[in-house]
Amino acid sequence: MTRKFFMVLLLAFVSGCTPVSGPQPVAHSLYLGKRYLRFVMDNGPSYKDVRLRDGSVLHYWRSDTGHLMAIATGRDENYPDYCEIALRTDPHGIVRAITIIEDSPICIGVLK
């Protein structure tokens, strides 16, 4: 009985220490509370826009420098380093939320 208890305890501890992958909300960025057009002017347009029922829009953006970064840093170009984010704007085009979908060092420069 004691052995099973310690196995369960160990499993709970190990699973609690695993990093969470998946979308991560951004708490601070130059673009939060600003017009989406500012983001587009600085970083380029989104590759996909989805209008939601409440009038807000999800703008999906991906950096296009992944292969260049991979080559410049000597990494295998089959595994590019890129940033992918979703920006949610209100009906007036103001950025209300940013979520990192695919994180990389490029995201730090993009989100400022």
Image (cartoon, rainbow, N blue to C red):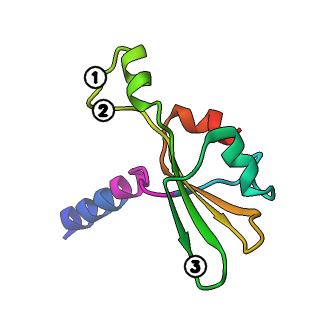
Relative to the observer, which residue lies in front, 78 or 45? 45
Q: Compute the Cα span from label 1 to label 2.
A: 6 Å
Which residue does the numbered mark 1 point to in the structure image?
Answer: 76
Q: Is residue 28 visible?
A: no
- Secondary structure beneath label 1: loop
Identify the disc placed on residue 57. Answer: none
Residue sitting at 35 percent across and 14 percent down? Answer: 74
Identify the disc placed on residue 52. Answer: 3
Q: Earlier in the sequence, mark 3 or mark 2?
A: 3
Residue sitting at 55 percent across and 52 percent down? Answer: 46
Q: From what the image shows, is residue 44 above or below residue 6?
A: above
Q: As shown in the figure, which amino acid type bears the numbered disc 2?
A: Tyr
Relative to the observer, which residue lies in front, 90 or 5? 90
Q: Earlier in the sequence, mark 1 or mark 3?
A: 3
Which residue does the numbered mark 2 point to in the structure image?
Answer: 79
Residue sitting at 59 percent across and 85 percent down? Answer: 53
Q: From what the image shows, is residue 94 above or below residue 84?
A: below
Q: Is residue 58 visible?
A: yes
Do the residues under discs 1 and 3 have CB atoms within 8 angstroms?
no
Q: Nearer the viewer, mark 3 or mark 2?
A: 3
Which residues are the magenta region? 13-23
Residue sitting at 62 percent across and 70 percent down? Answer: 57
- Secondary structure beneath label 2: loop
Q: Position of residue 33 (x, y in %)?
A: 80, 59
Q: Position of residue 76 (x, y in %)?
A: 28, 23
Q: Residues within 10 Å of mark 2 (few under 14, many from 20)?
A: few
Q: As shown in the figure, which amino acid type bears the numbered disc 3?
A: Leu
Relative to the observer, which residue lies in front, 100 or 69? 69
Q: Compute the Cα span from label 1 to label 3.
A: 38 Å
Q: As shown in the figure, which amino acid type bears the numbered disc 1?
A: Asp
Q: Position of residue 2 (x, y in %)?
A: 23, 66
